[in-house]
Image: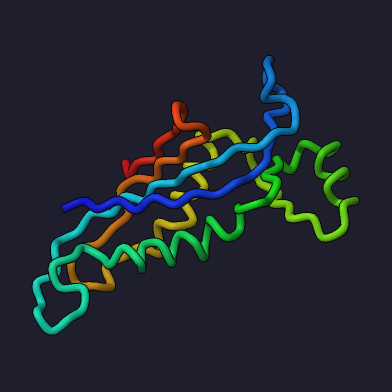
Amino acid sequence: MRITRRLEFDAGHRIPNHQSQCRHLHGHRYAIEITLSGGVIDASERPDDGMVMDFSEVKAIAKRHVVDLWDHAFLVWCKDQAVVGFLAGLPEHKTVVLDRVPTAENLASLAFAILDPLYRDSYGNHLRLERVRLYETPNCWADADRP
């Protein structure tokens, strides 16, 4: 069985070597979908009976480890020194410096790497992360899938 939980957040970024508008500082209303697979829990005495994982737990993990860190932050590539320096000069600015260009593809891959060890079979139902889908806009997204 597969289940998916969607969360949304706002963040800024830029793609410094892009040939169009994305080379400028700008922001998006991102959405992230977490897809898990596992067996349906069959234990009438448990509150998660009939579930792969409680959606509120799926949300809590993704929120704590990705969404809360990236929400209302500027996601910047460590080699984009002009922007890194500029943001460092803004008192208390929420900046997340990344080891890769903050494209939808790279953000989806990074979120998968962060979350993969957190959604594990601690429920006895072979739970595992299958996909992170990151929407940069309603019409553009990237999928990081388990190989």
Q: Residue furthest top?
A: 19
The picture places residue 135, in percent across and down from the top left corner, at 47, 37
Q: Eyeballing the image, is 16 above or below 128?
A: above
Location of the C terminus (image quadrant): top left
Q: Residue at x 90, y 51 (%)?
A: 89
Q: Is residue 95 left or right of residue 121?
A: right
Classify residue 115 by image quadrant: bottom left
Q: Eyeballing the image, is 122 above or below 21?
A: below
Q: Residue furthest right?
A: 89
Classify residue 14 by image quadrant: top right
Q: Is residue 81 left or right of residue 63?
A: right
Q: Residue at x 32, y 54 (%)?
A: 129
Of the pair 131 and 47, the residue shown nearer to us: 47
Q: Is residue 49 left or right of residue 24?
A: left
Of the pair 50 and 76, the residue shown nearer to us: 50
The picture places residue 59, in percent across and down from the top left corner, at 40, 62
Q: Residue at x 28, y 54 (%)?
A: 36
What kind of colouring is applied to the model shown? rainbow
Q: How many marks?
A: 0
Q: Residue furthest bottom?
A: 45
Classify residue 86 by image quadrant: top right
Q: Eyeballing the image, is 143 above or below 95?
A: above
The picture places residue 41, in percent across and down from the top left corner, at 14, 69
Q: Residue at x 60, y 37 (%)?
A: 28
Of the pair 59 and 102, the residue shown nearer to us: 59
The picture places residue 145, in percent across and down from the top left corner, at 35, 41
